[in-house]
Image: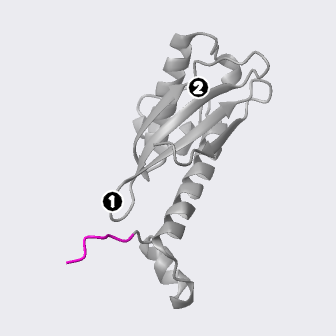
Amino acid sequence: MNNHKKLVSPILTRLTAGSENKKNSQVVLQELKEGVRFDLECLFNARYRCFSADSKYQHLEDSLLNYGLPDLSTINLSTQVARVKFCRQIEETITKFDPRIKSARVSASDNIDHDDPSIRFRVEARLFTNPAPETVIFDSSLNPVTQLIAVSEVYNDR
């Protein structure tokens, strides 16, 4: 019996790609990781509305009205406590809006570089992949001037 399992593309991708576009597991996995990285960057750079909906519309809490992060110019990230709270908020946002990620852990960097005022944090996530979950790590940096967050994958850091 062959115990080596092969990563496969989602069914819709396989059906629409046709037989001429077969990819190996490594290519499929790398494309998935790049897609997740891009989507996380979009999620982190989107800002949700700043007012609450009426309590009778509870389903709006998980809707696209709340897609993204709060306005970062209103958050003081100069203390460790504030950065930890911000990391928990990012974790909740990731698990709420990206169903490919089963669990996420976000940690802020304690290293402060006075020449580079960017705030750095790391996302460690478990991707739901077929046939087995895959761990992926992304480093992110928040530019305090532009309020934009850049996300890059960390390779071979396990």
Task: Read off the residue under disc 1.
Answer: 132
Residue 138, image x, y percentages: 56, 42
Label 2, secondary structure: give it.
loop
The residue drawn where x is 80% and y is 25% is 145
Task: Read off the residue under disc 2.
Answer: 51
Q: What stretch is highlighted in magenta?
A: 1-6
**Which of these two is toward me, 150 or 23?**
23
Q: Distance between the residues labelled 1 and 2?
A: 40 Å
The magenta stretch spans residue 91: no
Q: Furthest residue to the bottom? A: 19
Characterize the magenta stretch by its predominant secondary structure.
Answer: loop
Q: In the image, is 106 to the left or to the right of 131?
A: right
**Colouring of the image:** one colour
Disc 1 residue type (three-letter): Ala
The magenta stretch spans residue 2: yes
Q: Is residue 46 visible?
A: no
Q: In the image, is 136 to the left or to the right of 4?
A: right
The residue drawn where x is 44% and y is 53% is 100
Q: Quadrant of residue 150?
A: top right
The residue drawn where x is 51% and y is 90% is 19
Q: From what the image shows, is residue 128 above or below residue 43?
A: below
Q: From what the image shows, is residue 97 above or below residue 88?
A: below
Quarter of the figure that contains the N terminus:
bottom left
Q: From what the image shows, is residue 6 above or below residue 129?
A: below
Disc 2 residue type (three-letter): Phe
Q: Residues within 10 Å of mark 1 (few under 14, many from 20)?
A: few
